[in-house]
Amino acid sequence: MKSRLPLIVSSLLLTLITLPAYATPETFTVDPVHSMVFFKVQHAGAGYTYGMFFGPEGTFSADKEHPENSSVQVQIKAEAINTGNTNRDNHLRSPDFLNAKQFRVISFKSTSVKPLMGNTYELKGTLSLHGVDKEISALLTESGRGEMQGKTKVGYEAQFSIKRSDFGMNNMIGPVGDEIHFMVTLEGDLKE
């Protein structure tokens, strides 16, 4: 009687080879040239003043199969604020607002990523701003994926709002709104 062992082993190997590969988390380095933090805040109860922070840095990992394994860690210099007006920018860097000399870095570190619909996720984490750490929630959307100069790139956008008074910035509430709306655009290069 012939042994069926070689046939069984061959079948097992064929099954293993044809199983779909499971993606592992990909880690990206934030490209500070193509990433920005935009914000708007109401002025005098009328219009909005817009601004941005240049040059965010950090890393993020993305796991499409298991989004709960994804993470984000980003930081930016408080002095990098720019609203297009030098006097206003210097005032925003002063102790009246950001106090950028004492609190040099604004940072965010995720605690959870939860899929919602399509390429949209609920991102939760700790925002460290003006010496205060506070849990926030953001809507995170993958904006695209591409190749450039031999590098794999992926982009995400996050939107969230905070009250600056929650972070100890109580100066001029009324003439300047308490609620600040943010949109963060991150483009990352895949780590090899």
Image: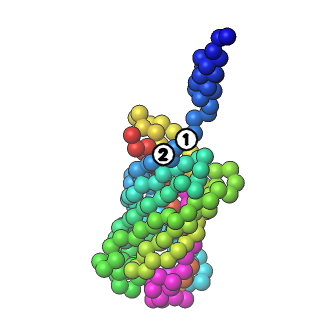
Q: Residue at the far top: name it.
A: 1
Give x and y (percent) for residue 32.
39, 54
Give left or right: position of 148 versus 22.
Answer: left
At numbered mark 1, what does the secondary structure look like: helix, strand or loop?
A: loop
Q: Which residue is mark 1?
A: 23
Measured in 3D between alpha carbons, the distance from the residue under mark 1 to the one under mark 2, in whole angstroms, is 8 Å
Res. 120 image quadrant: bottom right
| Tag 1–tag 2 contact (CB < 8 Å) | yes
Give left or right: position of 147 versus 114.
Answer: left
Q: Is residue 42 visible?
A: yes
Q: Residue at the far right: name it.
A: 117
**What residue is shown at x 62% (from left), y 59% (from top)?**
114
Q: Which residue is mark 2?
A: 26
Q: Is residue 87 visible?
A: no
Which tag is nearer the camera, tag 1 or tag 2? 1
Q: Is residue 18 above or below residue 115?
A: above
Q: Amino acid at mark 1?
A: Ala
Q: Amino acid at mark 2?
A: Glu
Give left or right: position of 130 versus 9.
Answer: left
Q: Is residue 184 magenta?
A: no
Q: Which residues are magenta?
A: 157-174
